[in-house]
Image (tube, helix red, strand yellow):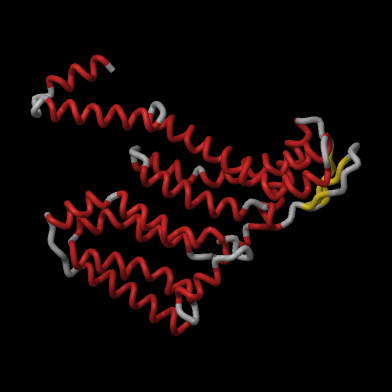
Amino acid sequence: MSTFEWLKGAWNGETDYEHGVLFPFVILGLIIFRFKDLREAAANDKGSFLGLVAVFVGAALYAIAYRTFQPRIAAGGLPFLLWGACHFLWGWRVAKILIFPLFFFWLAVPLPSFQQATTHLQLIATSLAHHGSALFGVETMVKGTTILPVNGDWKPLDIATGCSGIRSLMALLMISATWAYIAKIRLWQKAILFLMALPLAIIGNALRVTSIFVIAEYGDEKWAAGTWHDWSGLLLFYPFSLFLLLTVHSIFEGGLPWKKNAKRRLRREQVVKSGGTGKEDKVFVAES
């Protein structure tokens, strides 16, 4: 089995990496996003033999993976091969732009350590759902990862592995990393925006599970445990998480990102019209 065949098989519900099939398209989109910069960098730079060092590292990782039967190591070496080849052919400026898009592929490699975190996330989700339900007047009891009603007549609900939030966390890491890369903010702000995926996944998943208990208490138990359980991630978790990511991004930008980007474009246009004198640019700043 080749490395790509293994990856295709590993992107499944059991590993919580069903979104892995999206990574190649996201990486391609990030490269296209910087294509103009890449073309300019390739035209003004020359290849470097230092890129062969990264190629050698990638080849060595593949050899280690072959000898140890560890496909994850082979998959982790692929970005080194591609990045080193680009450095060798087109130089450092191109390689610098491609560092994130190519090594972003590491997030697509399923790691067993994340699976081990499922149990901890189950306990956290159970505790948060228990306390969150109390805020809406739904009294519950907790036994392990099972939540039972105190006054309601709905059946006990178990916070299973699928409800732990690990799957949502993996997908949200991909989204937040892409968002942070595209955002026009400082590096430390990009790091915070990326790391926000962890608390947002925990809070968003707790809100989703809490909504199931509230609907079971005051509404239809079967609908809450069935239809709403299956669709609440798409209808509640992701809109909530994306809204909070936008909020954090807007705080760093000092306003909504698209409005700030529009102002930047207008400012660049004013500089061009002023012929580099900056006179019209000063007028624009005063008016804004």
Farthest bottom residue in view: 67
Residue 17, compared with residue 280, is above or below; it is below
Image coordinates for residue 262, horizontal then vertical, percent: 31, 29
| Quadrant of the rendered image containing residue 266 | top left
**Residue at image point 50% right, 61% down:** 20
Image coordinates for residue 139, horizontal then vertical, percent: 84, 36
**Residue at image point 69% right, 47% down:** 125
Image coordinates for residue 32, horizontal then vertical, percent: 31, 53
Residue 15, compared with residue 253, is above or below; it is below
Q: How many marks?
A: 0
Farthest top residue in view: 287
Image coordinates for residue 102, horizontal then vertical, percent: 35, 60
Q: Left or right: where does residue 145 sit relative to residue 115?
A: right
**Residue at image point 73% right, 44% down:** 127
Residue 281, compared with residue 214, is above or below; it is above
Nearer the observer, 146 or 2: 2
Q: Quadrant of the C terminus?
A: top left
Q: Left or right: where does residue 213 sit relative to residue 26?
A: right
Nearer the observer, 176 or 269: 269
Q: Left or right: where does residue 229 sit relative to residue 39?
A: right
**Residue at image point 58% right, 38% down:** 240
Q: Left or right: where does residue 41 sit relative to residue 187?
A: left
